[in-house]
Structures are given as C-alpha cells and as structure tokens.
Image (cartoon, rainbow, N blue to C red):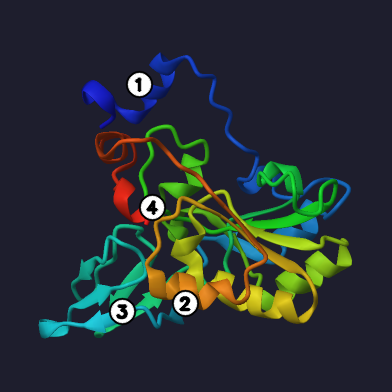
Amino acid sequence: MGPRGLSRREFLASSGKGFFCLAVVSSSLFTKDAYSYGKARSHGEWGWVGTKLSPYFHPLAGGEVQCSLCPRECGISPGGRGYCEVRENREGKLYSLVYGNPCAVHIDPIEKKPFFHVLPGTPSFSIATAGCNFDCKFCQNWEIAQTVPEKTFNFRLLPDKVLDIAYEYECPTIASTYVEPTIFFEYMYDVSVLAKRKGILSTYHSNGYINPQALDDLFQYLGAAYIDLKGFTEDYYQELAEGELGPVLK
C-alpha cells in the first residue's frame, strides 16, 4: 500500500506526475537499428531462470541462511526467497536466480543512465533482470522490478555474450540499470570483470542499498556509478520505498 493507504496504482493515478514507463519490457527490448528483436527473441523464453551460487550468505541453524548482499540481510528458510525474490535457499545454500537471464536489454544513450560526464554522446549497452531490493511506489519500471524471473521474458545472455554484443555495436559502456543491479550482483560482477579486460566501462545505476563487502568487491572493476537518492528522511524511505536512508548515506 502507498501513502495514506493508497494502492500503488491509486497513488500513481492521483500524483499527477505523468510517470513514464521505459520501453524495456519484452515487446521492445532493442532499438531497431541496433539489434533485431526477432534475433534476440530466439535466445530467450518466458520464465527462464539462470542460477549461480552466491558468495554473500551465512549458514544459520535449521538449514536457514542469511543473505549478506544488501542491508536487509534477509534470513531465508529452506526453499524460501529473500525480499528481492531472486535469491533462493536451496538445501542451505543461497543461489541467485537471475544469472545470465536479463529481461531488459537495450542500447541507450549514455545520458539516459543518467551520466553527462562519462563518454557523452555514446551508446551504452544496458541490461537488467527481474527483481529489486526496494519497493518504490513511484517506480517507473515496476513491471520488471516488482516481479519474479519466472514471470518475465528472459534472454540467454551470459557475460561473454553481453561483451560480444557491446563490442559488435560499438558501445564503450555496459550499464547495469532499470532495476536495482545489486540484486543481480554476480551477473553484474562477472560482466564487469570481462568488460575491464576488453577496455569497456562497466557502469552501475543504483539506489545505493548494498553492503560494504560487496561494494568493495565491485569497485575494482567499476567504471562509473550513479546513485539515486529517493528522499531526505527515514519516514519517506520507509513509506514510499520500504527501505532505509541510513545505509544509503553510509
């Protein structure tokens, strides 16, 4: 529920802000002159899930695990998932369910990330998976951010393929964007490692809700970051984003 007990749809309708949903869902994932949608669609399917063991968790009693990737630090029962809905406890180990299966793939101008001082005027190969660790009532990409990977059309793009496409279409940057990239951290990290080797900048458009260890691990491969500050008070973060301001500022 949104402010004053409104649902998300009621909140958006009453706000009068004219929120615009980015064209990053399955019907228009690639710009026409950059990549054939038909070609892309042949490499994906609805609900396809790619998994990878996460290094960011601690085992707990009774087969439970505690995720250590973001400040939520979710305690997850066997077979359960964290708040982001893309990390699952499988027999006492935490797996990412969004490795190599982005549901949003697009070539954007770098200014849309939005960067105005990083290689201005160049295209950026942009990716996102389903899920998020916030639940913003004003989210413009809620169709993919507030769902699970089983309900999105996902492309089979492992990190090496991401680099191949970025190189083929002369994109000097790869952007992890649209949703909170922290939730597909392992995917973003492996892409960033390969990107640095090939001289392509890896960029990160984030809400800043990530734990220090993961951020330190990413820093050495990151070319640029843009952090969204959603508001200025804890009450605002809790009511409109279901998050906390403190960890973002830290």
| Identity, as a three-letter code, of the amino acid under mark 2 | Thr
| Identity, as a three-letter code, of the amino acid under mark 3 | Phe
Q: Is residue 155 left or right of residue 237?
A: right
* The label number, if any, that marks residue 248 in the structure image: 4
Q: Secondary structure at mark 3?
A: strand
Q: Earlier in the sequence, mark 1 or mark 3?
A: 1
From the viewer's perspective, is residue 101 above or below residue 107?
A: below
Q: Residues within 10 Å of mark 3 (few under 14, many from 20)?
A: many
| Identity, as a three-letter code, of the amino acid under mark 1 | Glu
Give coordinates of residue 127: x percent, y percent: 64, 58
**Real-space CA distance between mark 1 and mark 3, rounded to the nearest whole angstrom:** 37 Å
Q: What residue sits right under mark 1 in the picture? A: 10
Q: Earlier in the sequence, mark 1 or mark 4?
A: 1
| Identity, as a three-letter code, of the amino acid under mark 4 | Val
**Real-space CA distance between mark 2 and mark 1, rounded to the nearest whole angstrom:** 36 Å
Give coordinates of residue 218: x percent, y percent: 54, 73
Q: Earlier in the sequence, mark 2 or mark 1?
A: 1
Q: What residue sits right under mark 2 in the picture? A: 51
Query: Residue placed at 40% from the left, 83% from the top?
Result: 55
